[in-house]
Image: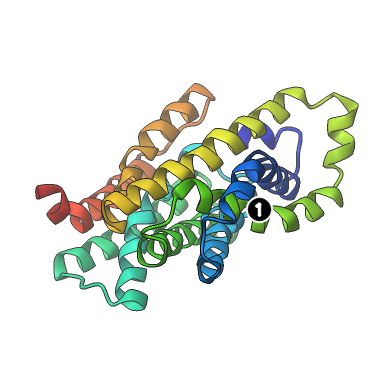
């Protein structure tokens, strides 16, 4: 959906529009939730909005101006690794040697994946390839914050309030781009529909469900759902004419191996 949206919108236009739509859709739930959520929870709610949706929306959109959707989807699999690293350093969650090895293997796979395409430009590919890696760091931060600070809060209310907090700045950014004029012209219907679907299903509803999963399990196990993302991303990429080199497939295998090492104990229980 990001790729289709970029056919008519710039990266900044798409990201700000994505957040703005999520903000407008979530507003009724946020109004209802304001009285239900304690004020001391507002800072962590803002942070999960910033790390869970705000920053990644811009990072992925910028990355995909130079990389494919399949590559970005595979890099998304780094989320459990960042969840583990952040949990260890910020929240003092124990990490075994096996999980530490998984982190190293996974990040090595990300490097291979980014630089493994044919005719790779080292500077450009590293720069744009790092953007989704940073986005997955943000996901790891958001997941840990949800588990540690918002365990007993309603995920619908917290997600909606978070979207409102980051939605107002996004609306200001969106209003100062050329996107409103493009939408009013009626010439970007297909791209706009893609962004709407991305905002409602891929952002708002997806995060409500994910945060609920985090509350019911643990941060690392919940983040391991990214096992499925490469399958979906590669499938859509192939349908849209994208191809992965043999080296990139090897990088994907390293990432998934690393994720397996970090989540193996939890899966065995």
Q: How is the image coloured?
A: rainbow
Q: Which residue is drawn at 43% across and 49% down?
A: 76
Drawn side of residue 161 relative to residue 114, left or right:
right
User: Which quarter of the picture shows residue 137?
Assistant: bottom left
On the question of residue 71 being in view, the answer is no
Q: Which of 119 and 204 is in front in this view?
A: 204
Residue 191 % position (x, y): 71, 29
Mark yes or no: residue 170 visible: yes
Locate the N terminus by quadrant.
top right
Seen in the image, is 133 located left or right of residue 107? right
Asked if 197 appears above or below 249 in the picture, the reply is: above
| Circle 1: element type | helix
**Residue bearing mark 1:** 164
In x, y percent, where is residue 123?
Answer: 58, 61
Q: Where is residue 117 in the image (x, y as percent from the top left)?
A: 47, 45
**What residue is at 60 percent from the left and 45 percent from the top?**
64
Left or right, 155 with reference to 168: left
Question: Pointer 1: residues within 10 angstroms few (<14), some, or many (20+)?
Answer: many
Residue that lies at the very extreme toward the front in this rendered image:
35
Along the line of sight, the residue nearer the viewer: 59 or 63 = 59
Could you tell me which residue is drawn at 48 percent across and 27 percent down?
236
Residue 163: image x %, image y %? 61, 51
């Amino acid at each position: 959906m990001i790729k289709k949206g970029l056919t008519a919108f710039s990266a900044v236009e798409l990201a700000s529009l994505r957040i703005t739509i999520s903000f407008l859709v979530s507003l009724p739930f946020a109004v209802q939730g304001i009285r239900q959520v304690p004020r001391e929870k507002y800072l962590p709610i803002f942070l999960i909005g910033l790390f869970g949706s705000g920053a990644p929306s811009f990072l992925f959109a910028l990355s995909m101006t130079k990389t494919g959707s399949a590559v970005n989807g595979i890099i998304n699999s780094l989320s459990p690794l960042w969840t583990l690293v952040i949990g260890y350093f910020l929240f003092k969650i124990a990490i075994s040697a096996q999980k530490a090895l998984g982190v190293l293997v996974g990040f090595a796979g990300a490097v291979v994946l980014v630089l493994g395409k044919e005719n790779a430009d080292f500077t450009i590919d590293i720069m744009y390839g790092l953007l989704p890696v940073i986005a997955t760091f943000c996901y790891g931060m958001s997941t840990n914050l949800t588990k540690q600070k918002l365990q007993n809060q309603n995920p619908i209310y917290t997600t909606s309030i978070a979207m409102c907090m980051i939605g107002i700045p996004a609306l200001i950014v969106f209003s100062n781009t050329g996107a409103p004029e493009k939408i009013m012209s009626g010439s970007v219907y297909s791209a706009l529909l893609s962004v709407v679907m991305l905002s409602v299903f891929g952002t708002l509803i997806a995060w409500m469900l994910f945060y609920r999963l985090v509350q019911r399990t643990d941060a690392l196990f919940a983040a391991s759902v990214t096992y499925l993302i490469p399958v979906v991303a590669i499938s859509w990429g192939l349908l849209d004419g994208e191809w992965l080199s043999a080296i990139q497939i090897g990088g994907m295998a390293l990432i998934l191996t690393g994720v397996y090492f970090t989540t193996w104990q939890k899966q065995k229980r």
